[in-house]
Amino acid sequence: MPSSSSRRQVLSGAGALAALGAVGAGGLTAHRSLRPAIDPRTEIPLWSQTVVYDANGQRSLVGARAGGRVPAENPRLSEDHPVSSPARTRAEEFWAGTADWRAALAAAPGVDEELTGLAESALRDLWVLSDQLPAPVAGWSSSWRYIWPRDVAFCAVALARVGHLDPAVSALRHLQALQDSDGWFEARYDPGTGLSPDGRDRQFDGTGLLLWAAAEVADAAGPDVREGVIEGLDAMIMTSLSALHTGTRGGAGLPPVSPTTGRCASGR
């Protein structure tokens, strides 16, 4: 089993790779200006635009095929949702917790109202798809109402960076509890039972992505609590490191073949 120093080296390397892959606000602006117009013949209608808590406090799909209207102020609460409710309080607390990140984004060079609006909409979706769940789900339609390890990796990093460290760590620790002893993960998990909802094959990408997420979340935590975050994720870090080392023959070969995102999307 690799030593604790190896663990730190792996986490440091994962953080460096993430930094190399980061896209700045200027890059986003350039991508937006250069992207081609969408051919309507290739556009697939969405099942919904987003998810809201309805008047009964249940999550409901709205917009696109699902019908209904997306609330104008985008709180992810339906227009007839009670003025005073636990969900509204949680939404307000989540939003307040992202204030510093939103202010920094708005002040960044090259960021305009469109990009700010997209970021704020993403924050709202991140909240409603993770609120009171053990980890964020990929969506709320019946085919996507599951916890995918790869999705959780990115959501956890996002949560930590925007100011919500505790739910980020909690999501990663939930996946840590679900990881198989050989380091692999199921393709997806039912948020209620923690079990795979079907017989599809396990997938290997979550092993690497969650290791990367552990590094990013630990870095976002800051120097005072970074080691505590790493220690709380020690089991997943060491198991994933061992699986990656074995699966690539110490870096001499490619990782084992496993199903891809495309297979998940096929609705098998």
Image (cartoon, grey):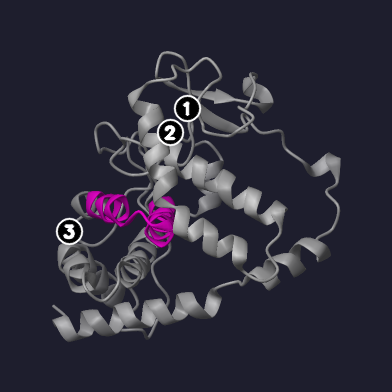
Question: Separation of disc 1 and disc 3 at Cα?
Answer: 29 Å
Query: Dot 2 corresponds to which residue?
Result: 145
Are the residues flagged by discs 1 and 2 in contact, CB closer than 8 Å? Answer: yes
Q: Is residue 14 above or below residue 131?
A: below
Find out whether residue 172 is within the magenta segment: yes
Determine whether, in the image, residue 177 is placed left or right of residue 32: left
- The stretch of residues the image draws in magenta is 150-174
Label 2 is placed on what type of residue? Answer: Arg
**Secondary structure beneath label 3:** loop
Q: Earlier in the sequence, mark 1 or mark 3?
A: 1
Number of numbered discs on residues? 3
Q: Residue at x 55, y 47 (%)?
A: 122
**Secondary structure beneath label 1:** loop
Q: Is residue 152 above or below residue 22?
A: above
The dominant secondary structure in magenta is helix
Label 1 is placed on what type of residue? Answer: Ser
Question: Separation of disc 3 and disc 2 at Cα?
Answer: 25 Å
Query: Dot 3 corresponds to which residue?
Result: 181
Examine the image and state in which quarter residue 22 appears.
Answer: bottom right
Query: Dot 1 corresponds to which residue?
Result: 142
Q: Nearer the viewer, mark 3 or mark 2?
A: 2
Q: Which mark is residue 104?
A: none
Looking at the picture, how far across and down is residue 37, in whole percent? 86, 52
Q: Nearer the viewer, residue 139 or 227?
A: 227
